[in-house]
Structures are given as C-alpha cells and as structure tokens.
Image: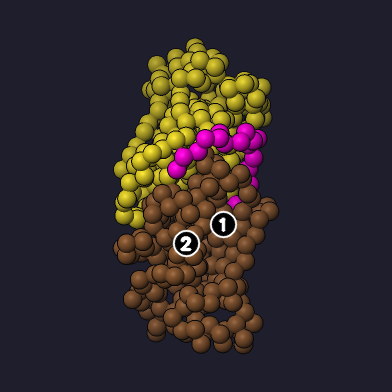
Chain colours: A yellow, B brown
C-alpha cells in the first residue's frame, strides 16, 4: 500500500440519500448485474439457466454511486440494492469479491431489507453477519464479502464505504467460491 | 502516505445503529466535548465564559465509536452528536480539524437534525454544505471540516467514516480558525 502521489484536490460536494427507501437520489454511476451475470455462482446451474430463459433474466443487484477519484485517501461509497429471489432454494446474492488491494476494509450500513453478509479469507476462514436495517457490518482487510438477500419481498439495501484504489477482485471468488451458501427452505434461512 | 506493514488480520463484526434516533447502540468508545473545551473557537469569548459559568458547562458534542485498528486500510467510523445551542448568536459547533494525514477524505451521512458543514483548505479556500437527514457530505482530502448545528431543538447527528491512520489535527484550526462563522439571528441562519 505505497502511494507516492498525493490525492487530487477537489471541491467538497454532497449527495442525497433517501435513508428510509434506500435510494441515492442523484447517482451518476449505475452498475446492473442480472441473473445471466451470475453463471457459475449458484449450486443449481439448471435452476439459474431456467431463471434466465423463462424468468426474463431478472436483475439481481444494482450499485448506485457518484464517483470520486479512485485514489488512496479518497473514500468510495455507494448504495447497493440486491433483489429478493431464489435460484432453486438458494437466496439471491452478489458475486462477492476481495479487494484488489486486499489489505483494505469495507463498511456496510444496512438501510433496508434482511440478509446475510458472507465473508471468507484466502486461507479458508468463513464468517457471516446478519444484515437488517441499522446493522453495520465491518468487513476487515483481507476478507472477501458477498451479500445475500434472505427476504421474500424487499430489496436488501446497504450504504457502503471503502477506500479509493481498493478495487474489486472477482476472479479469485469465481475460482474459489465461498465455503458456505445460504438457502431458504420452508421459510427457514439455512447457512450450509 | 507510505505504509510498509499490512493491516492487521481481524475477525468481522457488526454494530447496531438506530438510524432514526442516530444512536450507536453498543459503542465502546465515547468522547465528550463541553463548552469549556471550546475556548478560543467562538467570536464572543464573554458569551462562552458565561455559558460555562452560569450554564453549567453544557455538553457541545459527543463521538461514539467501536474502535478498529488505527491503520491505513482499516476504516474508522463513528456517530457524531452535536447539541443545539448558541454562544451569543453563534451556533454550537465542533472544534473542526484537518486530518493529520491531510490527504485523506471523510464521509458524513447526516441522520438527524439540521446544520452546516464548514470546510476550508490551508490556502484559504472555504466551502459549506447543508446537513439534513439523508444528506451525505463528501469532505475531500486536504479540507479541514467543522459541523455546525443550526437547529433549535434537535441534535445534529451524523454517521462518519474516514481512513484508519488519518488522525486529527486540531492545532492548525486553533491557530487559523475558519474564514466563516455560522450565526442564527431572528430565526435566520447567516454564514459570514
């Protein structure tokens, strides 16, 4: 984590967040992940294929932001919105990622919905934290993290902050997966 | 901003924030600043002395946190609670600070109350942003920042995030002050 150049000088600004509905009202950046972007991540590949073909490739999650310079010293922030749903009986989730600069943390302040934050280290440790409105999950340096929506109706919405230049390393999770998955069976959330 | 050692490895955890009332429910760290800690910061020193002597040295602001390692890569976070009130007709405010590591940003997500974020650079630029529930103020690297409560009844409460090891440099603000102050006269907020 060596940085020679100073962070760029910029003017202060503000953005508007609807804290109750979980919306970044003046977002200029918008990332969308659909079911078809999630191939290889769910246990039941056939159920995912069916969801894509017959379920009209539904949106899994979206990320809304107003970008700042991607430099150490700055703080990236976003609103993450993960839809409810199942692939077979596995709950909708994000791809999950390490940070490219693995030694950087991330903060998730849940604003809406209910879910699980799954976390893992490269050496196989696994952890989970409940997500519900007002729960702030601290993802320490070196932990890959994936959000899972365990609700039936509401999106799981979080306000997220991470260091500029942290970056997203999706490749390692595509290879490794997570040691645990989150299912909902008969109304019960099961992590296994 | 050179760091040789990696951030320490720690386990994930969560904290509970009452998003509506603006409380960090399981805080283990608690900083209190009273009127007597604010000597030298207000325009009317006599009014401050009277507030301390006759107003029973009221609390100005508090910071609640659950500490994480103070290392780059980690993210410090807190709930900042600034009481309403006046010193003469100048609104209650925080001391204000640069970061010791000046090239680091800070994010303030306002949860409750109303106020102004005053910001300045060492070379004399000055800026302000309104604070109200849902407003997220981005304090870029190199900007000193001070919160001001312009309300009459409610505390100004923000959820704040800044990089580990950023540090607080109060000394420069004690010497420089801010180019502008915030007053309330006849119900009107005046920045001058």
Front position in the image: B129 or B162: B162
Residue B86 inside the magenta-drawn segment: no
Kindly identify which residue carries mark 2.
Answer: B97
Dominant SS of magenta comes to loop
What subunit carries mark 2? B
Front position in the image: B49 or A13: B49
Where is residue A38 shown, x and y percent of the image?
45, 21
Split into 4 quadrants, where in the image is the C terminus of chain B? bottom left
Q: Residues within 10 Å of mark 1 (few under 14, many from 20)?
A: many
Q: What residue is rendered at 36% in x and 72% in y?
A: B180
Are circles 1 and 2 on residues that touch, CB within 8 Å? no
Kindly identify which residue carries mark 1.
Answer: B79
Where is residue A113 shown, x and y percent of the image?
54, 41
SS under mark 2: loop
Q: What residue is rendered at 45% in x and 58% in y?
A: B98
Q: What residue is rendered at 47% in x and 34% in y?
A: A1
* Residue A165, quarter of picture: top left
Front position in the image: A106 or A187: A106
């Amino acid at each position: 984590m060596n940085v020679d150049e100073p962070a760029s000088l910029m003017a202060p600004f503000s953005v508007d967040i609807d804290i109750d509905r979980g919306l970044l009202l003046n977002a200029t950046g918008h990332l969308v992940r659909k079911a078809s972007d999630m191939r290889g991540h769910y246990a039941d590949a056939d159920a995912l294929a069916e969801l894509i073909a017959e379920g009209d490739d539904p949106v899994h999650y979206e990320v809304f932001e107003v970008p700042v310079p991607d430099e150490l010293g700055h703080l990236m922030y976003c609103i993450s919105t993960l839809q409810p749903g199942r692939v077979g009986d596995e709950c909708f989730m994000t791809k999950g990622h390490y940070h490219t600069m693995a030694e950087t943390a991330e903060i998730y302040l849940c604003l809406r919905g209910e879910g699980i934050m799954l976390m893992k280290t490269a050496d196989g440790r696994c952890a989970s934290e409940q997500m519900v409105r007002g729960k702030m999950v601290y993802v320490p340096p070196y932990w890959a993290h994936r959000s899972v929506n365990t609700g039936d109706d509401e999106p799981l919405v979080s306000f997220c902050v991470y260091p500029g230049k942290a970056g997203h390393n999706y490749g390692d999770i595509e290879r490794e997966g997570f040691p645990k998955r989150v299912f909902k069976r008969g109304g019960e959330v099961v992590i296994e």
